[in-house]
Every structure is written in C-alpha cells, then in structure tokens.
Image: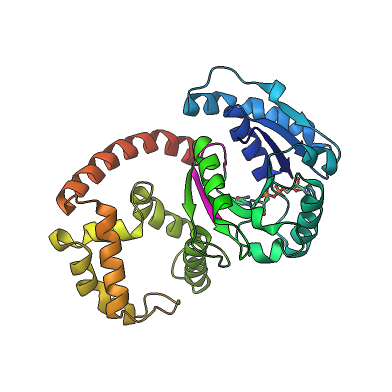
Amino acid sequence: MIKKIAVIGTGVIGSGWIIRFLAHDKKVIAFDKDIRLKKKIILEIKRTWPYVKKLFNKKKLKLKNFKYVTSLKEALKDADFIQECAPENYKLKTKLMEIVGKYSKPNAIISSSSSGLLPSRIYSKCKNASRTIIAHPFNPVYMIPGVELVPGKKTKKNILNKANKFYKSISMNPIMVKKELPGYLSDRLQEALWREALHIVNEGYATTKDLDRAIEDGPGLRWSLMGTFLTFHLAGGKAGMKHMLEQFGPALKLPWTKLKAPKLSKKLSSRVIIGTRNQAKGKSVEKLSKIRDEYLVKLQKLRKKYEDKIRK
Ligand SMILES: NC(=O)c1ccc[n+]([C@@H]2O[C@H](COP(=O)([O-])OP(=O)(O)OC[C@H]3O[C@@H](n4cnc5c(N)ncnc54)[C@H](O)[C@@H]3O)[C@@H](O)[C@H]2O)c1
C-alpha cells in the first residue's frame, strides 16, 4: 500500500502532484533545492483547494499530511513512492536518480515526471532500476487525469502494474506506453502540430492567433472527447475509417504537411481500421456521432462562459 510519497522538485509539476496526492489523503513529504518554495506551495495548495474539492468531492483539506523538508535524504528515507519533478535535463536527472536510488527504501517505486527523456538513460546509475518508471503528467496535474506510464529496459512488469493501480487510485487515467521512445506519446503528437504551426507562421500563411483558432474552433472542440482516430472514423460516414482512408489516403502524398508520412501499406491500413473499430466498442458511427454532438452542444455553452473571461 502506497501511503507516503516523496515529491522531489516542487516547481509547476511538483506542486501539482502535491495537491493531487493531498486531495487523495496521501502523506506527502516534499523537497526542493530551493527551500524558499515552501511558502509558495502552501499558498498554491490553498488557492487550488476550492477547485480540487469540487472535482474530487472532498470535504476537508488535510494540511497535516504535508511536510516540507530541507534535506533530500530526509525526504526519501520513509517514502513508499517517489515522484521526481526536477528540471528536464539528462545530466541533472541521471545524477539525481543515482542519489534517489541510494537513499530510498529498496522497494520504493521511483517515478519521474519527465516529458520525454528515455527512462533507461535517466535511471542508468540508479540502484535497483527494476523499480523505476516514468509517469508523465499534464499541467495542471491536480485537474488533468491523463498520465503516460513509460517503462525503461529494466522496469519489472509488476512495478508498472503497481504504478498503474496507484495512479488510478488518485483519480488518474494512466496510458501504458509499450516501450520507451523519446517524447513518449502525447508530446510527440503535440510536437508534430507545434512544428507544423511554426512552419506556417515562419512562411507567413497565418498568425499565431489564426492557428490557435484553427484548433480552438475546430478539432480542439472534439479532441477532449475523441482522439484523432475515432474523430476520423466518424468523418468517414457510415463505413467509418475504411471510407475515410479510401477518400483521404491519397492526400498522404499531397504536400499537406512538412512531416514525411509513412506509406499507407495494407498492414498499416488494417491496423488503423481495426484499432478504431475496437475503440468504437460495437457502437455505430451514427450512435457515436449522436453522443459527440450532444457533448459538443454542452461543451460549447460551457466554453463560451470561460472564453469571454479570457478574450474580453
Ligand atoms: N511544465 C509542464 O507543463 C510539464 C508537464 C509535464 C511534465 N513536466 C516535467 O516535469 C519536470 C519538472 O518540470 P516543471 O515544469 O515543474 O519545472 P520547474 O522549473 O517549474 O520546477 C523544477 C524544480 O526543481 C527544482 N530542482 C532543481 N534541481 C533540483 C534537484 N537536484 N533536487 C531537487 N529539486 C531540484 C527547482 O528548484 C525547481 O523548483 C520536468 O521533467 C518536466 O519535463 C513538465
């Protein structure tokens, strides 16, 4: 049972984890190289509590479960689980993980919040690396449920399963990445979009605002409910992804992106078609479209309220 968690590095992501852990009645012991951050974190916990309370249906903030220490060793010594949130840098994280491995309990799980570094590299000097993983969250960590779990070459299956169970127990939806790759999943997707957007801006076709609106008023509205594959499945009409690929497959050869597309082989087509069919869980495109449309009405009404606050 994971009860006591050490959070190492209490910047943007570290403080987000602290808030989520506290909201789920975990004991948190935090450390940052910059000890002045203690005051800031208490303020952040109090600022976010009204939202966190609503989201997780909690009654009372238990600040007594939170301790801030000024030594890394002290933070690590009793922890069942370590959530590392130091800056994204191979040299820094590898050195830090060597120390974390040395001073933590031998069976404590070590989890890094890295956004895209390879676990096998950052844990290369860590003692007992079979208990190490990556858990890549999204900002703000206390609100967003997604987290990508990435194993290193030495990570044991039962550690991944334990971590999966643990993140589920704090109201998250872990995504299990099959094997390590730089940038993991969502950052690779975001990076592709980002690089394409930079090409467009660089070549003067649109402003950053135009490009943001192209997402906000288009695919972005659907994306919070359905990802690219399921969205395109619905765009293919009755035949779903099959028709979608027949119609837009040839576009993979058009200069619609600066990224090189893979060859749409039979194997790739059937992997994509079967994958989306499985995602649909037997529901027809019509049925899924109805659910999507119902959602979009509600979402847009809600969004309008918050959009006005940002744009006015
Ligand atoms: N910001 C994001 O949106 C985001 C999203 C997902 C994951 N991440 C990942 O989370 C990690 C932390 O990012 P962040 O945005 O919170 O950075 P940040 O700069 O806000 O915080 C990093 C903290 O680590 C502290 N630190 C530096 N060296 C340390 C050491 N040796 N020991 C202990 N603390 C140390 C710093 O004082 C700072 O407070 C990175 O790996 C990053 O890639 C960030």
**Quadrant where the N terminus lies?**
top right
Q: Residue at x 22, y 60 (%)?
A: 235
Residue 167 to residue 228: above or below:
above
The image shows residue 166 at horizontal and vertical percentages of 55, 40
Q: Residue at x 70, y 32 (%)?
A: 28
The quarter of the picture where residue 95 lies is bottom right
Q: Residue at x 83, y 37 (%)?
A: 36
Confirm whether the magenta stretch covers residue 141.
yes
Looking at the picture, tell me which residue is in the foreground, 312 or 99.
99
The image shows residue 152 at horizontal and vertical percentages of 61, 62
Say if residue 10 shows up in the picture. Answer: no
Confirm whether the magenta stretch covers residue 185.
no
SS majority, magenta:
loop
Question: Which residues, given as a range, are shown in magenta?
Answer: 140-149
The image shows residue 217 at horizontal and vertical percentages of 36, 51
Left or right for 256, reference 77 = left
